[in-house]
Image (tube, rainbow, N blue to C red):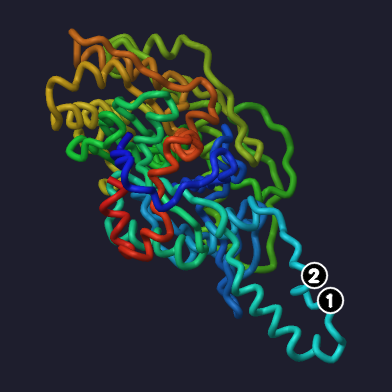
Amino acid sequence: MAQQPLPTTAQPTDIYGGDEVSALVLDPGYCTTRAGFAGEDVPKSVLPSFYGHVTSDPPKDVFGDECLIPRADFEIRNYMNRDSIVEDWDVANKVWEHMLIKRLQPERPTHPSKNGLNDEPKEADTEGDVAMEEAETQEKPLQENPLLITEAPWNTPKNREKAIELVMENWSCPAFWLSKTPVLAAFAAGKATALVIDVGGANTSVTAIHDGMVLKRSVQRSPAGGLWLSSQIRHLWRTSEPPVNLVPTYLIENKTAVDALAPAQYRERKFPFQVSDSFRLYEEERTLTEFKESVVEVWRGPGKLGAPGNEDYVKTQPGRVFEMPDGYNQMWREQRFKVTEGLFDDNAGLPVPESERLTKGQTIPELIKASLSAIDVDLRGNLLANVVVTGSSSLINGFNDRLNNELTAMYPGLKIKIHAAGLTSERRFAPWIGGSILASLGTFHQMWISRKEYEENGANIVEKRCK
């Protein structure tokens, strides 16, 4: 474990009763935020980290997929930044509260003595309301639930302190813990020592974990994630013959089936108000995600896709048909491999604006090389025998085979074993599942930062305890 157990003489300040602790686990990311109860195998509540902001008077924020629909004066925003670090704490508070309290906690009936129903009619109009307000302020919603939150390995001390303040001050949690996502992904795979390769929505990171601790010098990250793949697909669609027009689903009123490569025939839905660009981008991303899931593939090897003969071989293989929301459809063959090749070979990426281009050092093989070069040579063999692959973008067909080929070519004498969960939910939610395992362990109960400790030491206790 990351933390030394307390000596037997020191009585822990927070011993909870065995399995009755209903600890909560919260795993915020750039694309989605996941929350649920420790001990379960998947998060009960998964919400997009994107939320809707109504700009008209009075301005308000709405959360959850069902609220993200075309409406007037409506923008889509995100409370995280592309580095998976919380940017807007006011909204983070609202999103997390919405998930942990509204979605996970059942409505509790107010005690009959406090619900105002049994009061004298006169009192109810005046003091009864005041009494109810006082009762509401006294009872905080999460005062019985310890909370474990995940964080990126590069999270800032200021943000960590902000998290514990929010949890202790606003929600009155009895205990709190902050854990790094790669450590939890390794735990979810049943490993305390591992090289964790996390290919997520906004970025890719490679982190070496030794005995449940992040080796700080090994942390490498790059923007080569799902959003970068989306920009590659957009370029592919713009430059293909004929160009593919991306019309998101919400704009299609009806459509007629057409033959492959024939122009789309559809009627566009009109709205009596201006739909914001941010909403359109969000909806376009849904179509791009569908394309990634069903069409895009990684060239498995041997060698790179650009090696002589490989592209000709791919052209002979069966393609995949994809129908756009407007009905246009086309067979994709070698192009679907080109989209992902830039993850492994910086020269092979489709030409995109300079700001979005990956340098050689940002490709996945170079990230792994940089990560392993930064740590002790003696640890390399053990880490390469325990490579944990996680993150939604690692689910693209052929990714693991290619990674295995790249690692074998880079480290020819060493045994390489890749552990990648077969279930898509395990790959998407690995850090949450690791947190769920950790927070439900009986031996973890003495690790929590208790409310008492927080009150004695202040917010910087999180820096001392959660290494």
The image quadrant that residue 63 belongs to is bottom right
Residue at 38 percent of width and 26 percent of height:
389
Which label sits on residue 112? 2
> Is residue 426 positioned above or below 58 on the image?
above
Residue 78: x, y in percent?
A: 47, 57
Disc 1 is placed on an element classified as loop
Q: Residue furthest front?
A: 9
Q: Position of residue 298 (x, y in %)?
A: 40, 22
**The quadrant where residue 404 appears:** top left
* 114 on left or right of 374: right
Q: Where is residue 444 drawn, in percent x and y? A: 42, 39
Residue type of the residue flagged with mark 1? Leu
Q: Residue at 65% across / 73% down in the picture? A: 136
Q: Mark 2–mark 1 contact, CB under 8 Å?
A: yes
Residue 43: quarter of image: top right
Q: In the rendered view, would you say 73 is above or below 134?
A: above
Residue 47 location (% of width, % of height)? 57, 49
Residue under label 1, please give it: 117
The answer for how far apart the CA atoms under marks 2 and 1 are is 7 Å
User: Residue at 45% of width from left, 59% of height from top?
Assistant: 79
Q: Amino acid at mark 2?
A: Pro
Reading the chain from its start, which is encountered first: label 2 or label 1?
Answer: 2
Is 333 on the left-hand or right-hand side of 206? right
Residue 146 appears in the picture as rendered: yes
